Image (cartoon, rainbow, N blue to C red):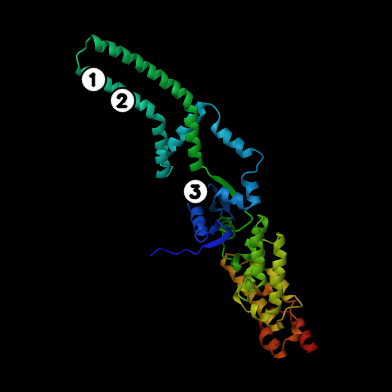
C-alpha cells in the first residue's frame, strides 16, 4: 500500500495547483546539520568551549547577524581565500606535502586520506600513461630482431617520447598551479572549517538556537528559556523571541517548579535587555506563590543577592516564619557547599554568621509567635538577643 503524506494543495489558477509538503523538511535539515562533513562552521560555545556545528549558508539565509558574522567582512574572507590559493607554486607544493605527510602520519581520518589519494591519482594520470607506453615499446623491441623499419619506428617513437615528455613538462608547468591549488583548496575545506568562539551563551542555549535556525523548530524549556530569549534577540530571530515571550506569558514557562531555575539563569544574562522584563514577570509570580516557592530545595540554588531581593519585597505573600526558614535553609546549604570545596575555615562555612550578616535584619520577628521565637529561633543563636527581645516586647 502506498504511503500517504500530509500535504497541502492550493488552487492558484484554473490550470495550476500549489503543492506543499513540509513534513520531512525539518527532520532532513536537522540530520544535515548533524553530518560533520557537511558542516562548514564550528562554534566553540561557553566556558568549556563545547563545539556546535552548523552550515554557513543556512545561518546566513536565516539571520542577518549570522550573515554579517560569516560573510560580510569587507573582503577579508575573499582575501584569505586568495592568499590560500595564490602565491608561488613551490609554496603551494610545500603546503600539499605537509598535508600529505600529515595524512601519512595518521593525523587525518581515512576519508581525508582517500580523498588525497584520489587527488594525486587524477593529477598524475598523464605521466603514468606515458610511462606505460614506453615500457610497452621497450618490451616489443626486445622480442623482435632489429630491422630497418623497426629502427625508423624506434627513432620516431623516441622523438614522440621526447615530445610527449616535453608536452608533459609543459602540462606539468602549466597545470601544477591549478592542480595544487585545487588540492589545497579541497584539503582546506575538509580539514579547516571556520571556527568561531561564542562566550556569551551556554552550549545548551546556543545549540537550541542553531537547531531552530536549521529546522524552524525548537523545544522551549524553562531551564534555557531566558538564554534562548536573549540569543534570539541578539541574532535577530524575532519569531523565536516572540515565541519565548509568549511561552512565559501563558504560564507554561513560569511555574512553581521553574521559577527558581529562571532566576538562577538570569545571573548569566543580566546585561541583556530581554532579561529585565522576564525577571520582573518571575518575581511577580514568586510574590503571588511565595509560600510554596520558598519551601523548595531549588530556592537554595539562587545567588545571595537574589534571595535578599525576594525576601525583602513587600509584595511577597509569605509569613515571616516561612521567610526565616527559607533564609536559614539557604545559609546552611551555602555553608555546606563551601565546606565541601575545602573552605571549612572560611567565613562562608559558618552558616550562623552568613544568616546573621545577610538575612537577620530582613525578617520582621514581631510577626512570629512568641512561642516559636523562644523555642525554635532563640536556641539557634543566629539572631541577636536584643532583636528577639524587642520583638517579644512589641507583641
Reply above or below: 46 against 118.
below
Q: Can residue 105 be seen here? A: no
Mark before the other along the chain sequence, 3 or 2: 3
Mark before the other along the chain sequence, 1 or 3: 3
Reply above or below: 121 against 322.
above
Q: What crowding class fits label 1: few (fewer than 14 Cα within 10 Å), some (14-19), or many (20 or more)?
A: few
Mark 2–mark 1 Cα distance, whole angstroms, equals 13 Å
**Mark 3 highlights which residue?**
38
Position of residue 209 measured from the top left corner of the image (x, y, whole percent): 59, 58
Mark 3–mark 2 Cα distance, whole angstroms, equals 39 Å
Position of residue 219 measured from the top left corner of the image (x, y, whole percent): 56, 65
Q: Quadrant of the C terminus?
A: bottom right
Q: Can residue 237 be seen here? A: yes
Mark 1–mark 3 Cα distance, whole angstroms, equals 51 Å
**Mark 2 highlights which residue?**
132
For the residues labelled 3 and 2, say whether their Cβ atoms are less than 8 Å apart: no
In the displayed structure image, the side of residue 57 where residue 234 appears, left or right: right
Position of residue 36 measured from the top left corner of the image (x, y, whole percent): 48, 50
**Mark 1 highlights which residue?**
140
Mark toward the viewer: 1 or 3: 1
In the foreground, 320 or 222: 222
Position of residue 45 measured from the top left corner of the image (x, y, whole percent): 58, 54
In the foreground, 291 or 234: 234
Residue with the most extreme top position? 148
In the displayed structure image, the side of residue 310 where residue 261 appears, left or right: left
Q: What crowding class fits label 3: few (fewer than 14 Cα within 10 Å), some (14-19), or many (20 or more)?
A: some
Q: Which residue is drawn at 66% across and 62% down?
A: 241
Q: In which quarter of the image is the N terminus?
A: bottom left
Amino acid at each position: 500500500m502506498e504511503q500517504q503524506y500530509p500535504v497541502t494543495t492550493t488552487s492558484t489558477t484554473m490550470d495550476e495547483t500549489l503543492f506543499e509538503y513540509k513534513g520531512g523538511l525539518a527532520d532532513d535539515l536537522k540530520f544535515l546539520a548533524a553530518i560533520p562533513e557537511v558542516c562548514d562552521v564550528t562554534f566553540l560555545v561557553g566556558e568549556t568551549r563545547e563545539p556546535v556545528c552548523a552550515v554557513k549558508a543556512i545561518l546566513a539565509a536565516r539571520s542577518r547577524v549570522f550573515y554579517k558574522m560569516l560573510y560580510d567582512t569587507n573582503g577579508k574572507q575573499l582575501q584569505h581565500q586568495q592568499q590560500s590559493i595564490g602565491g608561488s607554486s613551490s609554496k603551494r607544493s610545500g603546503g600539499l606535502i605537509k598535508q600529505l605527510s600529515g595524512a601519512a602520519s595518521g593525523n587525518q581520518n581515512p576519508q581525508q586520506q582517500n580523498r588525497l589519494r584520489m587527488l594525486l591519482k587524477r593529477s598524475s594520470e598523464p605521466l603514468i600513461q606515458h610511462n606505460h607506453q614506453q615500457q610497452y615499446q621497450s618490451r616489443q623491441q626486445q622480442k623482435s630482431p632489429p630491422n630497418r623499419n623497426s629502427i625508423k619506428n624506434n627513432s620516431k617513437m623516441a622523438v614522440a617520447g621526447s615530445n610527449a615528455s616535453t608536452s608533459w613538462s609543459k602540462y606539468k608547468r602549466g597545470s601544477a598551479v591549478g592542480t595544487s591549488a585545487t588540492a589545497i583548496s579541497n584539503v582546506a575545506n575538509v580539514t579547516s572549517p571556520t571556527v568561531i568562539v561564542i562566550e556569551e551563551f551556554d552550549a545548551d542555549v546556543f545549540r537550541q538556537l542553531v537547531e531552530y535556525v536549521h529546522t524552524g523548530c525548537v523545544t522551549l524549556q524553562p531551564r534555557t528559556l531566558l538564554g534562548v530569549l536573549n540569543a534570539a534577540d541578539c541574532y535577530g530571530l524575532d519569531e523565536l523571541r516572540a515565541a519565548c515571550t509568549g511561552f512565559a506569558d501563558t504560564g507554561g514557562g513560569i511555574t512553581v517548579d521553574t521559577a527558581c531555575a529562571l532566576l538562577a539563569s538570569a545571573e548569566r544574562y543580566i546585561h541583556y535587555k530581554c532579561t529585565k522584563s522576564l525577571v520582573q514577570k518571575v518575581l511577580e509570580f514568586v510574590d503571588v506563590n511565595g509560600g510554596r516557592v520558598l519551601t523548595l530545595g531549588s530556592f537554595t540554588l539562587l545567588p545571595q543577592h537574589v534571595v535578599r531581593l525576594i525576601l525583602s519585597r513587600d509584595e511577597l505573600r509569605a509569613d515571616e516564619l516561612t521567610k526565616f526558614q527559607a533564609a536559614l535553609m539557604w545559609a546552611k546549604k551555602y555553608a555546606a557547599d563551601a565546606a565541601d570545596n575545602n573552605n571549612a575555615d572560611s567565613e562562608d562555612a559558618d552558616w550562623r554568621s552568613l544568616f546573621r550578616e545577610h538575612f537577620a535584619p530582613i525578617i520582621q520577628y514581631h510577626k512570629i509567635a512568641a512561642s516559636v521565637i523562644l523555642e525554635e529561633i532563640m536556641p539557634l543563636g543566629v539572631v541577636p538577643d536584643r532583636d528577639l527581645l524587642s520583638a517579644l516586647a512589641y507583641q
